[in-house]
């Protein structure tokens, strides 16, 4: 049988029971920081057999339209459902009428559809998670370029970095909350189209960064040009897995964004992390020849995907 749980304490206990605690997305406190308590209601689906809990889909309901999605929203990627695959049809039947599971791990979806091909049309939307494995290039991004870039592209890339480094550049690594700098850069570059142009758009970032800082997971890079901060990246380092969450640079400075990303990768390499997760989307990640994991979004009801992730041709600067 399946029941729905709305109680905060019980939902947290269920999460702790099923979470593998491998990635940052497996931690209740961080995912709760992504959770907007004012907008979303906990709506966890609990599967029981003979009175024993043996499956969990941590749903939340959007109070503005009644739709449902996974706890933590659309930001976390490559997620699995904590259920037995054979139970998926039972879960699907009882899912709320409008439900979206964003960016499930492609390999997991392949296994699910091999068992239940009747749900193929519910999983038509494809994206890719981008990541690097520093051990593949001996913990030095220069080796990654040597292995994966053409000779001309590598020389051009290195020339761009030399140009920006010729300015009065200062790099600083710490555990500081640079949310306000990130917001200012985002609004400067994108104006009203920025996700962070309103106070509502800033609250999630503030919650997440505060949680990372409190638990010692936050790694922050700021780059100053001529004595003023002009770029920042804020990343999560958990269980030797690095996730680059928020990054922005002043587009008035050519190649500053490129330098920001390279220095972020190199710091993760210096710490000899297992993996650097750059999550989904954005053209430059494919152009930098990052590894890719397919991700699929499930929709109930099924709908034809409007867009499919493309493999872009040129990196951002």
Image: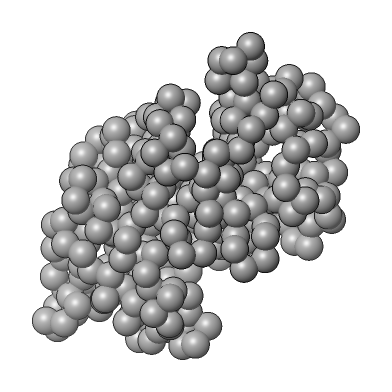
How many discs mark residues in the rendered view?
0
- Between 226 and 46, the one lying in front of the other is 46
- What residue is shown at x 52% (from left), y 48% (from top)? 42
Left or right of residue 247: residue 162: left
Question: In the image, residue 157 lies at what x, y percent?
Answer: 39, 63
Q: Which residue lies furthest to the right in this view?
A: 118
The residue that appears at 36% across and 54% down in the rendered structure is: 33
Residue beneath the point at 35% across and 47% down: 30
Screen quadrant of the C terminus:
bottom left
Query: Is the residue 138 above or below the residue 87 in the image?
Result: below
Could one spot residue 284 in this view of the protein? yes
Residue 206, horizontal then vertical, whole percent: 31, 66
Name the residue nearer the viewer: 310 or 20: 20
Residue 9 percent location from the top left of the image? 39, 39
Relative to 312, residue 184 above or below:
below
Judge by depth and name the residue closer to the eye, 232 or 157. 232
Q: Is residue 139 visible?
A: no
Q: Where on the picture, by quarter, is residue 66?
A: bottom right
The residue at 49%/87% (across/down) is 192
Left or right, 6 with respect to 21, comes to right
């Amino acid at each position: 049988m399946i029941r729905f749980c709305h109680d905060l304490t019980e939902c947290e206990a269920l999460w702790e029971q099923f979470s593998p605690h491998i990635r940052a997305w497996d931690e209740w406190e961080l995912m709760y920081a992504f959770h907007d308590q004012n907008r979303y209601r906990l709506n966890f689906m609990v599967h029981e057999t003979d009175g024993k809990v043996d499956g969990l889909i941590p749903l939340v309901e959007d109070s503005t339209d009644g739709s449902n999605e996974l706890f933590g929203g659309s930001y976390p990627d490559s997620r699995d459902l904590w259920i037995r695959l054979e139970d998926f049809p039972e879960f699907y039947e009882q899912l709320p009428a409008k439900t979206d599971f964003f960016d499930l791990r492609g390999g997991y979806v392949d296994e699910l559809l091999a068992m239940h091909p009747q749900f193929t049309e519910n999983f038509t939307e494809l994206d890719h998670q981008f990541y690097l494995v520093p051990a593949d290039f001996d913990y030095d991004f220069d080796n990654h370029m040597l292995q994966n870039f053409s000779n001309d592209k590598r020389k051009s890339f290195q020339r761009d970095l030399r140009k920006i480094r010729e300015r009065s550049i200062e790099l600083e690594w710490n555990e500081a909350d640079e949310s306000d700098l990130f917001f200012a850069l985002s609004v400067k570059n994108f104006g009203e189209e920025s996700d962070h142009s309103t106070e509502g758009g800033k609250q999630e970032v503030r919650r997440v960064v505060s949680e990372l800082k409190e638990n010692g997971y936050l790694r922050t890079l700021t780059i100053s040009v001529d004595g003023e901060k002009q770029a920042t990246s804020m990343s999560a380092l958990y269980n030797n897995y690095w996730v680059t969450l928020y990054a922005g640079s002043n587009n008035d400075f050519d190649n500053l964004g490129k330098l920001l990303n390279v220095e972020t990768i190199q710091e993760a390499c210096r710490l000899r992390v297992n993996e650097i997760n750059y999550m989904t989307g954005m053209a430059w990640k494919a152009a930098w020849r990052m590894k890719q994991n397919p991700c699929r979004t499930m929709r109930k009801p099924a709908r034809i995907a409007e867009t499919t992730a493309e493999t872009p041709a040129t990196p951002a600067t």
